[in-house]
Image: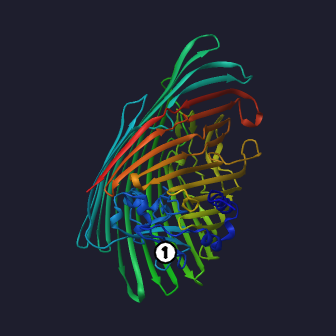
C-alpha cells in the first residue's frame, strides 16, 4: 500500500523525468480546481487565454505582476537598437506595441491595475490580426472597455551599512474620459549600484609571478535617475512623450604597498551624465479592400558626457567623451486579415546622426587618437512582407522577408561613405502535437546593427581600456536555426526547451589597428564563427503533490561559441559572451495571511572573457546572489514588500587581467592584476498604494 506522501513524491519524479508523457499524464495528475480559482482557457489555435481570475490567488497589484505569473513565459523589453521594428519585445497591449522606445511595455503595464485587464492571451506561433513582432511567443494584454481612473504612489527604500540611504519615489496616473485615455508617470531613483560596488583586494604581479604591489580595493558607484513620461490615446490615435536624465558618478581606488614597502594610491574617478528625450505617435485606420493601415512617427534625442580621471604616483591621465545624437523614424504598415491568414506589409525610413568628440591627455600632454572626433549620419530604409497562416488547427506557418539598406556617412577625422544592403528572410513553424505539447522551429537570417560609437575612439580608464574607431566595421550577420519543445501540465505548469544554432559571418569583436609604429585596439570583424545556445524555462507548481501555494520558476541558458583569434590565429570563444546564466525563484503564496514569500537566486554566475591584442581579461561574479522577499497585499490596491535578506552570501565580483609584452601571440607576460569587490548585503522595502 502506497501512502499519500509517497504517491505525491512519485508523481513529482514522473513529471521531472518523464514529462514527455504529454496530455494524458497531465490529465491523470491533475486534481480538481480549488474553489474560487479559474483555470486558463484551453489552447485554441495556439492561443491560451488567462482571465483575471486565474491570477486572483497571487493577489497582483499591476498588470506587470500578472504577465510575470504566466506559466512558461519570460517577458522581454526588446533590444536597444536604432529603428522601431527591430526593437520589439514580446508583450503587446490590445494587440499592438506602444509607439515608444524609451517607455517599455513593462513600464506601461506597471501603470495598469488588474481591474483594468479583460484577459491576457499567450499567443504561440501566431494568431489572426496579431503582429508577432518577430517573436515566436507573445503575451497580449487586453484592456477592459469603460471608465478607468487610478492614481498610484510608490516608494522604495534601500538600507545599506556602508552607504547613504537609497530612495525611489514614483507616481503613476491613468484616466479615461469617453474615448480619451490619458496616463503618465514621474519617478526618481537614488541608489548605490550594488553589482559593481564593494570592498576587496588588489594584487599586481610581474611576468615571473613575483608580487609587485597589493592592498585593499574600494569601488563605489552611485546612480541618480530622473524620468517623466506621458501618453494619450483617442480611439486609434496615440501620442507619447518622455524625458530622462541619468547621472552615474563612479570612484575606484586601491591603497597599495609595493615590494619595497612604499605606499601609494591608484584612483579612477568617472562622472557620466546621459540625457534622453522622445516624442512619438501612431495612427491606425481601416483602408480599402479590407486593409488596415498604421502610421508611426518617432523622434528621439540622446546626449552623454563622460569625464574620467586616473591618478597614479607621478602621473595623471584625463579622458573625456561627449556624444550628441538624433533619430527620426517614420514607419507605415498595412494588414489584411483573411479567415486563416494574416498578411502584413510596410516599410520604415530612419535618419540618424551622432557627433562624438574624444580627448586623452597623460601628464598634461595630449595623446593623438585615430578617429577621435567624428560625425556619423545614416539614412536607412527597410521594406517587409510577412504572412502568418493557420494551415490546420494544429499547424501555424509564419514566413516573411525584410530588406534593409542604409547609407552611412562619416566626416571629421575620417571621411567615408558606404551603402549596405541585406535581405533578412524568416520562417517559423509551430505544430501542436496535443493540447499540452507544442513544437516550434525557426530559421532566420539576422543582421546585427552597427554601434555608431564604434566608429570613434573611446576610453574607459576604470577598466584600463582604450579603443580607437574603425570606419571599416561591418555588421555581424548570421543564419539562425532554432527548435523549441513546449510542454504544459497541471494548469499552471510549463517546461520549454530551446536549442539555437547560429552560423555567424563577420563576427564583431576586438582587432588590432596599426597607426605608424603604434598598435591600438578597435572594434572589428573576425570572420566566420559559430554560436550555440540551450535554454530551459520551467514553471513548476507543487499544488498537485500536496504543497499548496508553492511554485518554482526558473530559466537557465548555456552558450558555446567559436571564432579564430586575430592575434594568435587559434580558436577561442567570442569576447564578452557569458557561457551560462540563469535565475530561479521559489514562491510560497500564503492566502490566509494575504502574503507571498519569495526566495530568488539571481544571475547564477557570470564568466566573461575579453581578448585584446596584448591582454586577456576575465570578469567573474560568484553565483550566490540570494534574496528573501516578503510581500503583504491586504487588498488589491496596496502592497508592502520587504527584502528581508538581499545578497545573503556576499556576492563577489572579480577581475583578472593578463597583460603581455607585445602581442598575445608571443606568450611573454608583462604583468598580471587581480582585483575583487565584495557586495555588501542590504535591506530593501517597497510601499505601493493605488486609488
Give residue 268's position: percent from left, percent from top. Answer: 49, 28
Q: Where is mark 1, residue-wise?
A: 41
In the displayed structure image, the side of residue 570 where residue 544 appears, left or right: left
**Can the viewer see residue 104 in this picture?**
no
Where is 487 relative to 551, above or below?
below
Q: Quadrant of the N terminus?
A: bottom right
Q: Quadrant of residue 618?
A: top right
Give residue 614's position: percent from left, percent from top. Answer: 68, 35
Element at label 1: loop
Q: Callout 1 environment at 10 Å: few (<14), some (14 to 19), or many (20+)?
A: some
Give residue 584's position: percent from left, percent from top. Answer: 56, 50
For this orientation, the residue located farthest to the front is 1
Residue at 53% in and 63% down: 71
Where is 317 relative to 9, above or below?
above
For this orientation, the residue located farthest to the bottom is 289
Where is 76 relative to 304, above or below?
below
In the displayed structure image, the side of residue 555 where residue 91 appears, left or right: left
In the displayed structure image, the side of residue 174 where residue 642 appears, left or right: right
Residue at 45% in and 80% down: 335
Give residue 516's position: percent from left, percent from top. Answer: 64, 37
Q: Nearer the viewer, residue 382 or 225?
A: 225
Q: Nearer the viewer, residue 63 or 469?
A: 63
Q: Quadrant of the C terminus?
A: bottom left
Q: Quadrant of residue 115?
A: bottom left
Amino acid at each position: 500500500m502506497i501512502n499519500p506522501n509517497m504517491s505525491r513524491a512519485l508523481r513529482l519524479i514522473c513529471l521531472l523525468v518523464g514529462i514527455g508523457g504529454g496530455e494524458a499524464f497531465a490529465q491523470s495528475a491533475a486534481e480538481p480546481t480549488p474553489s474560487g480559482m479559474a483555470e486558463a482557457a484551453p489552447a485554441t489555435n495556439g492561443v491560451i487565454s488567462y482571465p483575471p481570475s486565474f491570477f486572483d490567488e497571487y493577489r497582483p497589484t499591476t498588470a506587470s505582476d500578472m504577465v510575470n505569473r504566466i506559466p512558461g513565459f519570460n517577458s522581454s523589453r526588446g533590444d536597444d537598437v536604432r529603428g522601431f521594428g527591430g526593437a520589439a519585445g514580446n508583450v503587446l497591449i490590445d494587440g499592438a506595441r506602444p509607439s515608444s522606445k524609451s517607455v517599455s511595455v513593462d513600464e506601461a503595464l506597471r501603470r495598469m491595475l488588474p481591474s483594468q485587464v479583460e484577459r491576457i492571451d499567450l499567443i504561440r506561433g501566431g494568431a489572426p490580426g496579431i503582429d508577432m513582432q518577430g517573436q515566436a511567443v507573445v503575451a497580449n494584454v487586453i484592456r477592459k472597455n469603460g471608465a478607468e481612473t487610478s492614481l498610484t504612489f510608490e516608494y522604495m527604500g534601500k538600507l545599506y551599512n556602508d552607504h547613504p540611504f537609497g530612495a525611489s519615489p514614483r507616481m503613476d496616473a491613468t484616466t479615461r474620459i469617453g474615448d480619451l485615455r490619458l496616463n503618465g508617470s514621474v519617478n526618481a531613483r537614488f541608489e548605490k549600484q550594488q553589482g559593481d560596488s564593494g570592498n576587496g583586494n588588489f594584487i599586481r604581479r610581474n611576468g615571473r609571478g613575483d608580487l609587485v604591489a597589493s592592498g585593499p580595493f574600494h569601488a563605489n558607484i552611485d546612480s541618480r535617475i530622473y524620468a517623466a513620461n506621458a501618453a494619450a490615446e483617442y480611439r486609434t490615435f496615440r501620442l507619447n512623450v518622455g524625458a530622462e536624465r541619468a547621472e552615474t558618478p563612479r570612484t575606484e581606488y586601491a591603497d597599495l604597498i609595493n615590494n619595497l614597502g612604499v605606499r601609494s594610491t591608484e584612483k579612477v574617478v568617472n562622472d557620466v551624465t546621459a540625457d534622453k528625450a522622445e516624442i512619438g505617435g501612431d495612427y491606425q485606420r481601416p483602408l480599402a479592400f479590407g486593409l488596415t493601415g498604421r502610421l508611426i512617427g518617432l523622434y528621439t534625442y540622446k546626449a552623454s558626457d563622460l569625464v574620467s580621471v586616473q591618478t597614479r604616483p607621478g602621473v595623471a591621465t584625463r579622458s573625456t567623451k561627449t556624444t550628441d545624437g538624433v533619430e527620426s523614424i517614420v514607419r507605415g504598415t498595412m494588414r489584411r486579415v483573411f479567415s486563416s491568414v494574416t498578411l502584413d506589409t510596410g516599410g520604415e525610413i530612419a535618419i540618424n546622426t551622432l557627433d562624438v568628440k574624444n580627448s586623452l591627455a597623460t601628464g598634461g600632454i595630449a595623446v593623438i587618437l585615430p578617429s577621435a572626433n567624428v560625425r556619423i549620419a545614416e539614412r536607412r530604409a527597410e521594406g517587409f512582407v510577412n504572412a502568418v497562416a493557420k494551415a490546420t488547427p494544429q499547424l501555424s506557418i509564419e514566413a516573411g522577408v525584410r530588406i534593409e539598406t542604409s547609407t552611412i556617412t562619416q566626416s571629421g577625422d575620417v571621411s567615408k561613405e558606404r551603402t549596405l544592403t541585406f535581405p533578412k528572410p524568416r520562417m517559423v513553424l509551430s505544430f501542436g502535437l496535443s493540447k499540452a505539447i507544442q513544437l516550434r522551429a525557426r530559421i532566420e537570417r539576422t543582421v546585427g546593427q552597427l554601434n555608431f560609437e564604434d566608429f570613434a575612439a573611446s576610453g574607459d580608464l576604470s577598466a584600463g581600456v582604450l579603443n580607437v574607431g574603425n570606419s571599416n566595421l561591418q555588421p555581424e550577420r548570421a543564419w539562425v536555426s532554432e527548435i523549441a519543445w513546449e510542454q504544459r501540465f497541471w494548469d499552471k505548469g510549463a517546461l520549454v526547451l530551446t536549442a539555437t544554432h547560429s552560423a555567424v559571418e563577420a563576427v564583431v569583436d576586438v582587432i588590432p589597428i596599426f597607426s605608424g609604429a603604434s598598435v591600438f585596439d578597435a572594434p572589428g570583424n573576425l570572420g566566420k564563427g559559430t554560436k550555440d545556445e540551450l535554454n530551459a524555462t520551467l514553471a513548476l507548481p507543487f499544488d498537485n503533490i500536496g504543497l499548496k501555494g508553492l511554485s518554482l520558476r526558473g530559466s537557465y541558458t548555456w552558450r558555446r561559441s567559436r571564432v579564430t583569434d586575430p592575434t594568435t590565429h587559434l580558436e577561442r570563444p567570442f569576447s564578452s559572451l557569458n557561457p551560462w546564466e540563469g535565475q530561479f525563484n521559489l514562491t510560497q503564496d500564503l492566502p490566509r495571511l494575504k502574503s507571498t514569500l519569495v526566495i530568488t537566486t539571481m544571475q547564477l554566475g557570470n564568466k566573461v572573457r575579453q581578448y585584446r591584442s596584448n591582454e586577456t581579461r576575465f570578469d567573474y561574479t560568484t553565483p550566490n546572489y540570494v534574496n528573501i522577499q516578503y510581500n503583504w497585499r491586504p487588498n488589491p490596491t496596496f502592497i508592502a514588500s520587504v527584502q528581508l535578506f538581499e545578497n545573503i552570501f556576499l556576492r563577489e565580483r572579480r577581475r583578472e587581467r593578463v597583460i603581455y609584452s607585445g602581442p598575445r601571440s608571443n606568450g611573454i607576460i608583462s604583468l598580471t592584476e587581480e582585483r575583487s569587490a565584495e557586495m555588501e548585503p542590504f535591506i530593501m522595502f517597497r510601499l505601493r498604494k493605488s486609488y
